[in-house]
Image (tube, helix red, strand yellow):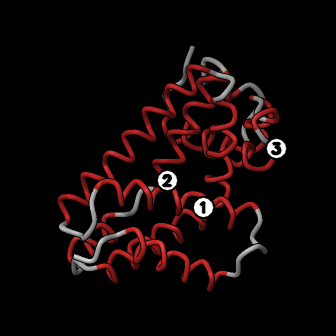
Amino acid sequence: MVRRNEQRRAALVDAAIEVLARDGARGLTFRAVDTGAAVPPGTASNYFTSRDDLLTQAGARVYERLQPDEETVARQRAAGRDRQVYVTLMRELVGRIASFRTGYLALLELRLEATRRPGLRQVLTERVRADMEANVRYHEESGLPGDATAVKLLYLALNWLIVEQLTLPDVLPPEERDRLVRAAVERIVADG
């Protein structure tokens, strides 16, 4: 029987994210999630039909938690439409993702696990494709400079910059990260 207490489910999925980031996909067990969520043993198995279900829901939750809040979206929509605004948006994006370090590390674990689990690969592929399409659509509707290719190139370049910062933070100091974000926007996005 799958339980429906949504607050408890969210706490369990958040605990799964922390376990993935700390122990990797092999360390993700129902027992580890129960311990991480500080709930009685057996609770996670009452909420998720399988480990694959838990992996999939953890991936969805990471994306949910990475979404900007309404205030940030409203501020972005009210901003200008030049490359400097684009640089600011990209810095905010990199900062938001970097501040949820465990979520992004869990997502990396999920991506690796997806190479061995076709169902998870399908779910993540659909989610990443939808995310990229939403970014392109937002960009086109916003009137920011550049085209869909620029959005995709920035998406890919900044994702690797984030991986570098979260996995090997001593490679680039934070101020260099900011310079690289600006350089990426200036070199990829047409001025116009």
Q: Nearer the viewer, residue 125 or 28?
A: 125
Q: Which of 91 and 1 is in front in this view?
A: 91
Q: Is mark 3 on a helix, strand or loop?
A: helix
As displayed, is residue 107 above or below residue 112? below
Tag 3 or tag 1, which sits nearer the N-term? 3
Q: Name the residue: 21% across, 58% down.
A: 140
Which picture quadrant has residue 33?
top right
Q: Name the residue: 75% across, 70% down.
A: 169
Q: Name the residue: 69% across, 28% down.
A: 43
Check disc 3: other Cα within 10 Å, few if <14, some if 14-19, many if 20+. some
Q: Percent from the top left, x then y, of residue 66?
A: 48, 56
* Dots 2, 1 in contact, CB < 8 A: yes
* Dots 2, 3 in contact, CB < 8 A: no
Q: Name the residue under label 1.
A: 100
Q: How far apart are marks 2 and 1 (CA)?
A: 8 Å
The disc placed on residue 23 is 3
Check disc 2: other Cα within 10 Å, few if <14, some if 14-19, many if 20+. some
As displayed, is residue 13 above or below residue 134? above
Q: Name the residue under label 2.
A: 65
Tag 1 or tag 2, which sits nearer the N-term? 2
Amino acid under disc 3: Asp
Amino acid under disc 2: Arg
Q: Name the residue: 65% across, 81% down.
A: 174
As displayed, is residue 178 above or below residue 147? below
Q: Nearer the viewer, residue 125 or 47?
A: 125
Tag 3 or tag 2, which sits nearer the N-term? 3
Check disc 1: other Cα within 10 Å, few if <14, some if 14-19, many if 20+. some
Q: Is mark 2 on a helix, strand or loop?
A: helix
